[in-house]
Image (cartoon, grey):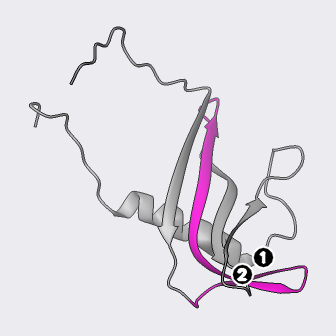
Amino acid sequence: MNLTVTGEPVIVHEDTVVNVGIDLRPGTLTLTQNGKDFAAYHALVQFASVHENPWAAQEVKFSAKGPDGKSVGLTVDLLNDACDGPRAGVPATIWKVVALAATSAGDVGITYAPPGRA
């Protein structure tokens, strides 16, 4: 590998964002928008921790197949306009998707050590 690196990586703790993707079993979640049904097959949930506050879910980006069989993206904003709490009217099933993502991120048991430091 022809690469050199200088410096030390530092995480900005003021606004840390983590995206958690989960695959959804086909046929288990249908999103309806403007009278059209979309079969969701993947969800990418964005969590953020601002100024070291507890993690909050900001949005869910769904990948889904439309009635014509083409893939589309649908985004659900989870924070209210002031960004200080959950958005009213978000269906309970969307919050279940958020909970599944949060649980999978904590339950998969990922551990990591850089090569040579295990």
CA distance for labels 1 and 2: 20 Å
- Where 60 sits versus 23, above or below? above
Q: Magenta: predominant secondary structure element?
A: strand
Q: Secondary structure at mark 2?
A: loop
Disc number lying in front (1 or 2)? 2
Judge left or right: residue 9 versus residue 85.
left
**Residue type for callout 2:** Gly
- Assign the C terminus to one quadrant of the image: top left
- Where 96 sits versus 6, above or below? below
**Residue type for callout 1:** Pro
Q: Residue furthest bottom?
A: 27
Q: Residue furthest top?
A: 6
Horizontal and vertical percent position of residue 72: 69, 69
State which quadrant residue 69 falls in: bottom right
Judge left or right: residue 104 versus residue 70.
left
- Where 61 sits versus 6, above or below? below
Judge left or right: residue 82 versus residue 60.
right
Q: Residue at x 58, y 89 (%)?
A: 28
Front position in the image: 26 or 45: 26
The numbered disc on residue 91 is 1
The answer to whether residue 103 is magenta is no
Which of disc 2 and disc 1 is earlier in sequence? Answer: 2
What is the tally of numbered marks visible in this picture? Answer: 2
Q: Secondary structure at mark 1?
A: loop
Q: Residue at x 14, y 34 (%)?
A: 115
How would you rate the neighbour count of disc 1 (Cα within 10 Å): few for under 14, some for 14-19, many for 20 or more?
few
- Assign the N terminus to one quadrant of the image: top left
Front position in the image: 14 or 115: 115
Horizontal and vertical percent position of residue 20: 51, 56
Residue at which label 2 appears: 66
Region rendered in magenta: 27-54
Horizontal and vertical percent position of residue 34: 90, 79
